[in-house]
């Protein structure tokens, strides 16, 4: 609504036509909304996200210059398109406009920089021992680094230090990473 007010658009109700109108106007002004969706594949099975939603998202992203959609998923685009065809057998697959980029393992320097730069504005510092601990759990795997580092961060927020921090972080890592390993 803030964007709509800025662009002098009226959104009496939210629908795909209103979204397309806003995004078209943004594109004309050489501006964009960037929509980031993590675990995008979980929306495929959610009852509130219908084929209409995915179709509208695809349409607005491809027909206007005002919307950029960046998703993260454990499923490939091919698999998501297969699922979408089961839900909606008519027309093009919903996700054939998405470019798939698989994350490669990070280098040790990239891992450290990712963690340190993410925490920069939080006031939380990760010690060398914490970095070694994250490495022992996740190595260079991007998703596992995220999970391990979030466990260390959460334990630090609880003012845990040393072995207590790493014990808490390790327990959270195994709880949070279980679903990832269950998929295999």
Image (cartoon, helix red, strand yellow):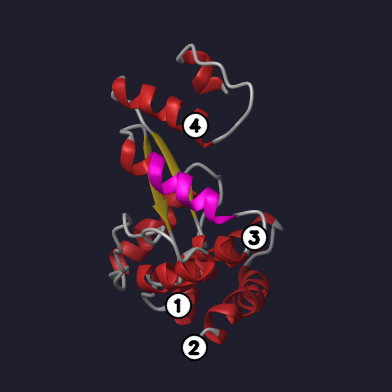
Q: Which residues are magenta?
A: 50-60
Among the 4 quarters of the image, the one containing residue 167: bottom right
Q: Earlier in the sequence, mark 3 or mark 4?
A: 4
SS of the residue at dot 2?
Answer: loop
Q: Residue furthest front?
A: 90
Residue, disc 2: 184
Q: Earlier in the sequence, mark 2 or mark 1?
A: 1
Image quarter hosting the N terminus: top right
Q: CA distance from mark 1 to mark 3?
A: 17 Å
Of labels 2 and 1, the one closer to you: 2
Residue 72 highlighted magenta (yes or no): no
SS of the residue at dot 4?
Answer: helix
Q: Earlier in the sequence, mark 4 or mark 1?
A: 4
Tell me the tag on residue 138: 1
Q: Earlier in the sequence, mark 2 or mark 4?
A: 4
Count residues near mark 1 (Cα–Cα under 10 Å), then give few for <14, some for 14-19, many for 20+.
some
Residue, disc 3: 154
Going 57% across and 60% down the picture, which residue do you hit?
Answer: 43
Residue 147 in the image, given as x and y percentages of width and height? 53, 69
Q: CA distance from mark 3 to mark 2?
A: 27 Å
Among the 4 quarters of the image, the one containing residue 151: bottom right
Q: CA distance from mark 4 to mark 1?
A: 44 Å
Going 38% across and 57% down the picture, which residue do you hit?
Answer: 114
Residues at marks 3 and 2 touching, judged by CB atoms closer than 8 Å: no
Query: In the visual, does 97 lie left or right of 56?
Result: left
SS of the residue at dot 1?
Answer: helix
Q: Earlier in the sequence, mark 1 or mark 3?
A: 1
Tell me the tag on residue 117: none
Q: State the predominant SS element of the stretch in magenta.
A: helix
Query: In the visual, does 16 lie left or right of 178?
Result: left
Residue 123 in the image, given as x and y percentages of width and height? 55, 45
Residue 123 against residue 94 in the figure, above or below: above
């Amino acid at each position: 609504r803030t964007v709509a007010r800025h662009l002098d658009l009226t959104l009496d109700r939210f629908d795909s036509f209103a979204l397309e109108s806003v995004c078209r106007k943004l594109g004309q002004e050489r501006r964009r909304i960037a929509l980031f969706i993590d675990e995008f594949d979980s929306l495929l099975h959610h009852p509130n996200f219908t084929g209409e939603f995915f179709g509208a998202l695809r349409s607005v992203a491809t027909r206007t210059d005002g919307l950029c959609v960046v998703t993260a998923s454990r499923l490939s685009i091919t698999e998501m398109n297969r699922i979408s065809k089961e839900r909606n057998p008519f027309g093009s697959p919903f996700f054939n406009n998405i470019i798939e980029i698989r994350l490669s393992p990070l280098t040790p320097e990239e891992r450290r920089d990712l963690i340190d730069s993410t925490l920069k504005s939080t006031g939380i510092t990760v010690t060398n021992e914490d970095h070694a601990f994250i490495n022992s759990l996740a190595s260079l795997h991007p998703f596992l680094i995220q999970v391990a580092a979030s466990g260390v961060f959460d334990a630090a927020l609880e003012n845990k230090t040393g072995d207590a921090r790493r014990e808490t972080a390790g327990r959270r890592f195994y709880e949070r990473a279980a679903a990832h390993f269950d998929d295999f």
